[in-house]
Each structure stands twice: as structure tokens, then as C-alpha cells.
Image (tube, rainbow, N blue to C red):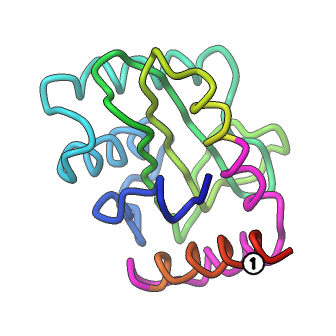
Amino acid sequence: MKLSEIVVERAVVPELQATDRDGVIEELVGSLVEAGAASETDRPVLIERLLAREQKSSTGFGRGVAVPHAKHASVSGISVAIGVSRGGVDFASLDKQPVYSVFLLLSPEDQPDAHLTAMEAIFRHLSKDTFRRALRQTTNVDEIKTLLVEVDAQNLGG
């Protein structure tokens, strides 16, 4: 699964406005709603489900990244929003460090295998220091899109 195929381009936020975890989740769900990847009607329940997941254990996995994720019946396909925070956000990360890059994943409830495959694709890239650093240096949607295409091509070649 390629990141460039599951990231919703119109849900890429190169400069998050929110400064706390809940606000970031609301902002990224909003970007998916505005992009047509999730419905306005389901916005509150999607946010609620994502925040409930955070209460169980943080999706701030360390190294400045977080991957909030949820499955819901109303979601028709794998959809990822990306947000970049310039100042960092407290996500109660495992390493206690601020989060700068957030990949928010929504998946259909009836596709658990696709959800896991998408998580693997996200983590495969986020585990690379060069990718995390490059993502933090992006300043607009086009740069993020180009970065995703490049890392997908590198992954296929190597």
C-alpha cells in the first residue's frame, strides 16, 4: 500500500493551527470532512472515537510523530490526513516529547486487514529519520505530496 494513494491530498494541513491533541484531532477530522472523505454528520462520532482511542493509550509513538486512528462503519475507504505542527503538540507520547507530524487514519469497520496494512505503510515511513525530518521541513501541500511520492518510489525500489 502506497502512502501517496491513501493520503487525501485535500486533507493535508502543512501548518496545524491547533496547539493541543484534541484540537489537532478535530482539525484533521475537519480536513477529511472538507475533502469529502468523511461526512459532516459523522464528524462528532469520529472525533469521539479517536479521542476514546487516545484515552486507552496515546498514539504519540515517539520521535515527534502520532498516528491517531479509528474504524467506523460510515467510512467508505482508507483515508489519511496529515498535519504538521511547527511548535509541537503534547500527545502524551511514549517518549514524553512533542509531536510535530500527525497522520490521522480513518478506516471502514469491515476492513480490518486494510487498516493494518495502512498502519504498516505509515509506520514503515515514519520509522525513517530522513522521512520524519523531511516532513517537518515541508511548508506546503505540494512539498508533502512530492515527498510521499518520492518515499513510495524509494520503497518500491529498495
Q: Toward which corner of the image does residue 44 lie, by quadrant? A: top left
Q: Residues within 10 Å of mark 1 (few under 14, many from 20)?
A: few
Please name the residue that numbered disc 1 is placed on: 154
Q: Is residue 142 left or right of residue 150?
A: left
User: Majority secondary structure of the magenta segment?
Assistant: helix
Q: Quadrant of the C terminus?
A: bottom right
Residue 103's spot in the image, x, y percent?
55, 50
Q: Label 1 is placed on what type of residue?
A: Gln
Residue 30 belongs to the span the image colors magenta? no
At a point 49% along the width and 77% down the height, the residue shown is 144
In the rendered view, tell whether residue 35 sits above or below residue 60.
below
At a point 47% along the width and 25% down the height, the residue shown is 50
Q: Which residues are magenta?
A: 120-142
Question: Between 152 and 100, which is closer to the camera in this rendering?
Answer: 152
Question: Between 108 and 50, which is closer to the camera in this rendering?
Answer: 108
Residue 71's spot in the image, x, y percent?
47, 21
Looking at the rendered structure, the secondary structure element under dot 1 is helix
At a point 28% along the width and 51% down the height, the residue shown is 31
Q: Toward which corner of the image does residue 48 lie, by quadrant? A: top left
Q: Is residue 115 left or right of residue 144?
A: right
At a point 51% along the width and 83% down the height, the residue shown is 146
In the rendered view, tell whether residue 75 sits above or below residue 60.
above
